[in-house]
Image: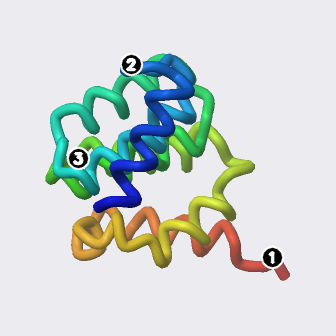
Amino acid sequence: MIAARQALGLIQEAFGKEPDVAEVLAMGATTLICLGDHARAEAWAKRAILLDPESYSVHYNAACTYAVIGKPDAAQKCLEYVFSQMPRARGWLLANARHDTQLDSLRERPEFQKLMERLEAHAAPVS
């Protein structure tokens, strides 16, 4: 909790109370989750996507935020966007989504399982 407060303080010191750098907002959203500020975390995640809709890491961090705050459909939508619109990021997405505990609330969802199967199929060597 102390580390999250310090991280948020550094973000706000460097970028202001309402940063407008997408990567900072997306990562800041995950920090806000640690502090229990879910409404602000969601707002920062949404804003990050608006600022940089082409960033796979912004979509991924938004997905993590949504998964933790109980918005699994929004989380899934972000992950699906990375899969469908950013094929170069699929390996990265698979590597992160396999073990990221922030996505644990999605693991039993059929939609998430199907996405993981598609990611694994994409990563499988072609013979």
Q: CA distance from mark 1 to mark 2?
A: 46 Å
Residue sitting at x 47%, y 77%: 99
Q: CA distance from mark 3 to mark 2?
A: 26 Å
Please report whichever mark, 1 or 3, sits nearer to the chain's N-terminal start.
Answer: 3
Report the number of discs: 3
Amino acid type at image mark 3: Asp
Q: Which residue is mark 3?
A: 73
Image: 8 above or below 116: above
Image: 115 above or below 124: above
Q: Are marks 1 and 2 in contact (CB under 8 Å)?
A: no
Q: In this orientation, which residue lies closer to the viewer: 98 or 65? A: 65
Q: Nearer the viewer, mark 1 or mark 2?
A: 2
Q: Which residue is mark 2?
A: 18
Residue sitting at x 49%, y 35%: 11
Q: In this orientation, which residue lies closer to the viewer: 114 or 101? A: 101
Q: Which residue is mark 1?
A: 126
Q: Are marks 1 and 3 in contact (CB under 8 Å)?
A: no
Image: 14 above or below 59: above
Q: Nearer the viewer, mark 1 or mark 3?
A: 3
Q: Are marks 3 and 2 in contact (CB under 8 Å)?
A: no
Q: Residues within 10 Å of mark 1 (few under 14, many from 20)?
A: few
Q: Residues within 10 Å of mark 2 (few under 14, many from 20)?
A: few
Quadrant of the image for the N terminus?
bottom left
Residue sitting at x 69%, y 72%: 123
25 relative position to 70: left or right? right
